[in-house]
Image (cartoon, helix red, strand yellow):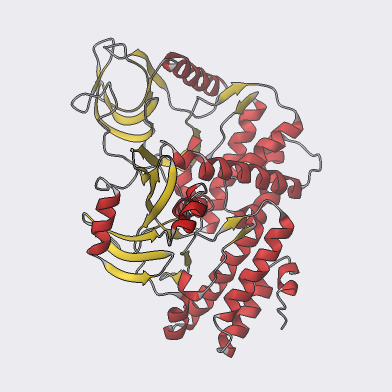
Amino acid sequence: MSDLETTNTLTENIYPLPSVCPVVENNAVTLSDGSVLTTLQVHRMLPGRRWVFSGMWQGLSVFAKVFIGAQAGKYANRDAQGAVLLAEAGLKTPALLWQGLTQNAQASVLIYAAIPHAENAHQLYAQSDTAQKFTLIEKIVRVLAQQHAAGLVQTDLHLKNFVLADDAVWSIDGDGIRKKDLSRKACYQQLAELVAKLAILDQQAWALALLAAYQQQRQWSDSFSSQQIIAWAKRHKAQEVREYVERKIFRNCTDVVWQQATTFVLAHNAHVALPELTPDVLESAMQAGDMLKDGNTSTVVRTHLAQLGAVIKRYNIKNIFHAIGRSWRPSRAAISWSNAHRLQYYGILTPKPLAMLEKRFLGLRGEAYFVSAISALPDAFTFFKTISDDALRTEALRQLVLTCYQFYLLQISHGDMKATNLHVNAQGQIVILDLDSMQQHRCAKRALRAHVKDIRRLLQNWKDDTSLYNALLQSFHAVYVDHTPLKLAGISI
């Protein structure tokens, strides 16, 4: 395992085959016609409802969608109908090879032809350089325009609905495809929904060009504001993120396994193999680890869970009054868990969140634990004090200010921008730690005030280093398009 595990996307993973999928036996699914899906690997899952497998069927490489539950047939039919609509419109989409039930009639199954050399657009966007990212998104925008021109709309639009193969974009998820003629405003709103999937800085930089590509594909010449696209995208993204970090990650979903016991609740990362976690297991791991902080309100230890390196932060209860005050509010561990996933969703680096556990007594919260991957990177103070590579130093300064600017655009405040909470990787990118004071504000005025405090706290780290302080000031003025927070922070050159 690497010294640092950070995540800046919610990537599509290959999971261990879950034993809870009721129609899988010996890594195979037998279908109603006697044919068999074999060599299965799980790519996406919604436990108890849907699995997406890659595998082999009649000598072909395929992807299979397996639906279970009372409405399995309904969802399978809807997915198949969407695939037919895409194909009839002349859009590139995988061929539907088979539709039916499993041999035991417990599940509905769709089998699609695998696309050779296909790469998921969500992963490609995360891994590519800026020019490659823009080229990819522009192609997807043109495919979206083709869908709209054919009278098709996606009800759940995201980058995972597209793959790139041989330089062409394929539409791969029929479930959200509906036949519907859209008004021009609705078309632009869907474009904004797609733009919302991009990192905030890419939204700002590319909105005008992506709008032009969409209009060119539709052969529209009307004027429309790219700022309106950005505004719609911002609103859509905020709603999407709130749904994810306030609700979805506190129940079973593709990314999280949720467990509720008599004396505690546990959320853990579905993409990481962890030992069974209980308060006793976490306490034992802390006893065996290296103390990083031993405070009244929190204790932080670097340790191992089985063979996995981890940092465990336990949020302590100081006394009975503190216990009463914390018992009915979300724990700081839950806030850290939520904020780590928030940063992931926005493409901002942070150590991978592994688990969150809250002790419960009669439903009331007690001590809580937040578990994350280890960061062995230098903090920003150490990095800038020891770096001898001028180009890397300049890039790290730029990345630090770019991170601040992303927070500003997203109305996020960190709450404690000391250098030890900011780690720097080998490319000069910033990794954010200590997330229990972080907030995403709905009120723009409050967000601005909090951001100004963050800027001031950040600059305090290097108030005695005139050269670095001045370089930071120059970077702030170069990066920030809107200088309002800089003026309020008292920054001048």
Q: Is residue 337 above or below residue 49?
A: below
Return the residue nearer the eye: 466 or 250: 250
Q: Quadrant of the C terminus?
A: bottom right
Residue 362 in view: yes
Q: Is residue 387 left or right of residue 465?
A: left
Q: Position of residue 124 (x, y in %)?
A: 46, 48
Q: Is residue 84 above or below residue 231?
A: above
Q: Position of residue 18 (x, y in %)?
A: 27, 33
Q: Quadrant of residue 204?
A: bottom right
Q: Is residue 489 above or below residue 272?
A: below
Report the number of discs: 0
Q: Is residue 304 left or right of residue 141?
A: left
Return the residue nearer the eye: 61 or 491: 491
Q: Is residue 10 above or below residue 72?
A: below
Q: Position of residue 258 (x, y in %)?
A: 38, 39
The residue at the point 31 percent across, 47 percent down is 272
Which residue reaches farthest front?
Answer: 320
Residue 3 in view: no
Q: Position of residue 253 (x, y in %)?
A: 42, 36
Q: Quadrant of residue 252?
A: top left
The residue at the point 23 percent across, 57 percent down is 284
Q: Quadrant of the N terminus?
A: bottom left
Return the residue nearer the eye: 432 or 196: 432
The residue at the point 48 percent across, 21 percent down is 79
Which residue reaches farthest left?
Answer: 26
